[in-house]
Image (cartoon, rainbow, N blue to C red):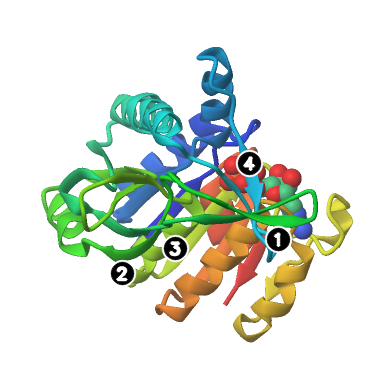
Amino acid sequence: MLVVKIGGAAGNNMDTVCEDIAALIKQGQKVILVHGGSDETNAVSEKLGHPPKFVTSPSGFSSRYTDRETLEIFAMVTSGKINTLLVERLQKLGVNAFGLSGVDGRLLEAKRKEAVRAVENGRVRMLHDDHTGTIQTVNAALLQTLMDAGLTPVVAPLAISPEGVALNVDADRAAAMIAGALKAESLVILTNVPGLMRHFPDESTLMPNIERAKLGEALKFAEGRMKKKVLGASEAIDQGVQRVIFADSRVHFPVSSALSGKGTVIA
Ligand code: ADP
């Protein structure tokens, strides 16, 4: 079992990723694809006159502030467009892909963040009406049922709260939770850089291997959204995933090359 996460940032190459995944599936590999959609959500939000807002928590994590309107735009972009187009690409390549978000069949149940602590001008403010969540449970049986029926799940990063409210969740951590719940052998997190760099953006400082016990130390090298990937990697490893690989989506055969050890391998 292999879980692949493809980023939403500019430069990520969906075509090569899908071609590689289709080839792996034809060789008998079971794959679940999880995707993001951050940059396109920003662009569409701007176009719709509801510009994105990002907040930084006191511990330094940056996240999207998601009011109801933003949540609806996020759903439109991720579930509506990106997910459908990934399924379309895979179908064109002969893979019977099945798109769903974490809302469908309660695939991903998340605890809603009641209030978000945001640092603004050096002061901590509480923001309410946020529609983001932290995933608590994965409906692994649902994914298993789809795969038993010969379908390849393609998952958009939305979740549902126990009260039935749709939430925006981090796609890296969604992929990590899914990989953990299904006891995947590998989680490949593809992005628009070759892996985790000790001194970003100097690619000569790429870290080829990180021991699981040293993941906490590695967190300090990650800036911005890369922090969520390191956090996701540690959640996946804690739940029994054998290895997590951060790798470049822009190369030929990005998934196969990650599986052969290119990128940052955490084990
Ligand atoms: P995606 O949308 O593909 O998931 P993100 O934008 O969320 O990607 O995260 C990847 C980005 O993290 C890279 O493009 C890079 O700008 C940034 N980054 C921050 N720190 C590092 C680091 N130490 N090593 C590599 N990338 C880093």
> Which is more toward the observer, 251 or 245?
245
Q: Is residue 249 above or below residue 177?
A: above
Does label 1 or label 4 sit earlier along the sequence? 4
Q: Position of residue 153 (x, y in %)?
A: 27, 46
Q: Which mark is residue 235?
A: none
Residue at position x 44%, y 35% in the image: 19
Name the residue that disc number 4 marks.
54
Give the residue type that dot 2 points to: Ala
Which mark, by number, is residue 60? 1
Residue 76 appears in the picture as rendered: yes
**Type of amino acid under label 4:** Phe
Q: Tell me if label 1 and label 4 are in contact, CB under 8 Å.
A: no
Give the residue number, with chain letter if any, for mark 3.
176
Q: Residues within 10 Å of mark 4 (few under 14, many from 20)?
A: few
Residue 262 visible within the image: no
Circle 2 sits on which residue? Answer: 181
User: Badge 2 local density, few (<14 within 10 Å), some, or many (20+)?
Assistant: some
- The Cα atoms of the two marked residues, 3 and 1, are separated by 21 Å
Question: Mark 4 to mark 3: distance in Å?
Answer: 23 Å
Residue 7, position as x, y percentages in the image: 55, 42
State which quadrant residue 60 falls in.
bottom right
Q: Where residue 18 sits: x, y (%)?
A: 44, 36
Q: Secondary structure at mark 1?
A: loop
Label 3 amino acid?
A: Ala
Q: Amino acid at mark 1?
A: Gly
Label 2 and label 1: CA atoms lie apart by 28 Å
